[in-house]
Amino acid sequence: MPPSKFPKHFDGKRFYNPNAPQAPGLLDLLRWKLTSRPQPSPNFIQDVEQSTPPRRVEGPALRITLINHSTVLLQQRDSNILTDPIWSERTSPISWAGPRRRRNPGVSLKNLPPIDTVLLSHNHYDHLDLPTLRKLASRGDSTFIVPSGVGRLLRSQNIGPAHELDWGESLSLTSHTIHCVPALHFSSRTLFDRNHTLWCGYVIEYPERLVYFAGDSAFGNHFAQIRERFGSPAIALLPIGAYDPRWFMSPVHMGPDEAVRAHQILAATTSIAIHHGTFQLADESIDTPKKQLMSTAGDASFLILNNGQFADFT
């Protein structure tokens, strides 16, 4: 693999989105909250049929199970990878407030197979959920891969081993290689640590195919950069939710129409929608992203899985 061509994204103190808008600030957040007109959504939707993944998938076949939000289980060649796992009831630093779960996970923790690798895209509460990570770590034998600066938080909670990667860096494992790639987003867990740690996506390089997990990202030229560097992925996991109002969300989240453009730029054989349908994090209702994508994508190359559903790729 040639040396990284990804642009500089650290100024010595904080990370930033190169050649792109930065995330809105506190005053913009207050403006949004004061003017917000969220679409109504049910308090809870009882339509999830939980599934039980196999313990292992042998050989070159790939099984992808959507668990919820951005939590996806990838199974291939006796290796199980989990992205941004969350089983908590809220995406919040406190258990009694914050965005509440609107749908159950599609796989229960007790039915989750052994997890070899956990990929974390950034430190926001809906992507880095410490209660879930502690439960996964207690099971043993999981390696945690995180963007630059996030390892310290995991180590403080006795979660590990944690390997930090910067954009362009890679980690070779037994049957595949994990490449850290750019995303357009931001990081923070308090009012005082904004952009102290990095955000990213990942390219998983199997012998048979590439799988791209975009993490949480706005639309930008990094999709073309990723395709240029690695080639077109067989499968792309692309976020479609938390995009309304656009004036506030567009620097950090894609809408369904932008996810379709990203799918086309990547020239992915198949894309799968993530980051929707479980938590209402913006003004659009819980299932609006799914409906918008169905009307925008127009073909079967962009899949919409329900929590617990899986797709097999040979």
Image (cartoon, rainbow, N blue to C red):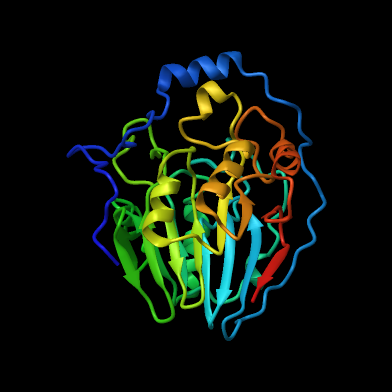
Residue 268 is situated, as x and y percent measured from the top left of the image, at 56, 57
Query: Quadrant location of residue 62?
Result: bottom right
Regarding residue 48, the answer to whether it shows in the image is yes
Tell me if 121 is positioned left or right of 40 in this view.
left
The C terminus, quarter of image: bottom right
Q: Residue at x 48, y 21 (%)?
A: 29
Residue 269 is situated, as x and y percent measured from the top left of the image, at 60, 60
Q: Residue at x 24, y 60 (%)?
A: 3
Q: Please, is residue 313 above or below residue 219 in the view?
A: below
Q: Please, is residue 45 above or below residue 49 in the view?
A: above
Tell me if 131 is positioned left or right of 4 in this view.
right
Extreme residue in the right direction: 47
Residue 133 is situated, as x and y percent measured from the top left of the image, at 48, 60
Residue 18 is situated, as x and y percent measured from the top left of the image, at 31, 36
Regarding residue 157, the answer to whether it shows in the image is no
Query: Quadrant location of residue 220?
Result: top left
